[in-house]
Image (cartoon, grey):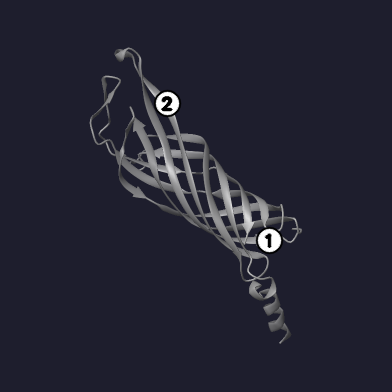
Amino acid sequence: MKKILLLVMMFRCPLFSQGWDASITLKGTFTTSTRFLYDIDREIYSGEHVLESNYGYGGDVRWNMLWDRFYFGVGVEKVRSSEITYVVYTHLQDLRVPSEEGFDMSALELSGYYIVPISSENIRFYIGGGFGLYDGERIHRYANVQAATIKSESNIGIHVMTGIDYKINSRLAARGELKFRDPHFTITDKFDKPYAEFHNARIPLSQRERTTQINLFGVNYMLGLAVTL
């Protein structure tokens, strides 16, 4: 009987102990690196490209459950990044044609968080992990013409994180988080016309379908404000 009472105390419902405890976070994110792997449907990849400094934004909802040190959360995030380089056509009076490579990713993540016992009333440390669904589009423009997406494949992945909350007042806290994950998605695209009109010149466009894997393999940093409900 004593063991049963002890288990009940350890896993007591917060509804009876501390009341409903939930928070909403608005956040900005920064992912250090994103890799593009080209022609992954072929025996030999045709190359890769890395984008640095990928910024995003989003939010999450977290609530206390099972016991006072465990939280469950649902989060969404949007990350968009691109880079423009130029191809010089010497036979067209050194015409500089822009080539843009980038992506637009959406993430839906489910996470569990454990409050580390060294936390205090004003500073709370946590660790956690979970899984997410990642989907996106490739930004692939040449001579200001966007390639048409033929097929898009999303991906499910896992993540782990550690974070800290600094209490500003009874309802507001600053939140910082460091997350490790490896989301990726695959895009098959193709230009739907053979050439582009650019500065009174006809610029040829490749007519080959190309399958590219976009992988946000860098560390994800988050800063945000958390409001307790």
Q: Position of residue 40 (x, y in %)?
A: 37, 42
Cα separation, mark 1 vs mark 2, equals 46 Å
Vertical comparison of 130 with 48: above or below: below
Question: Dot 2 surroundings within 10 Å: few (below 14), some, or many (20 or more)?
Answer: few
Q: Position of residue 185 (x, y in %)?
A: 41, 47
Residue type indicated by callout 1: Ile
Q: Give the total of numbered labels.
A: 2
The image quarter containing residue 129 is bottom right
Question: Dot 1 surroundings within 10 Å: few (below 14), some, or many (20 or more)?
Answer: some
Helix or strand or loop: what does disc 1 sit on?
A: strand
Residue shown at the point (68%, 68%) measured from the top left: 68
State the quadrant of the N terminus.
Answer: bottom right
| Mark linked to residue 85 | 2
Answer whether residue 45 is visible to the viewer in this image: no
Vertical comparison of 72 with 91: above or below: below
Outermost residue to the bottom: 1
Residue shown at the point (25%, 34%) measured from the top left: 207
Residue shown at the point (27%, 29%) measured from the top left: 205
Answer whether residue 27 is visible to the viewer in this image: yes
Residue type indicated by callout 2: Thr
State the quadrant of the C terminus.
Answer: bottom right
Q: Position of residue 118 (x, y in %)?
A: 76, 58
The image quarter containing residue 128 is bottom right
Residue shown at the point (32%, 12%) measured from the top left: 93
The residue closer to the viewer here, 64 or 112, is 64
The residue closer to the viewer here, 59 or 133, is 59
* Residue annotated with mark 1: 115
Helix or strand or loop: what does disc 2 sit on?
A: strand
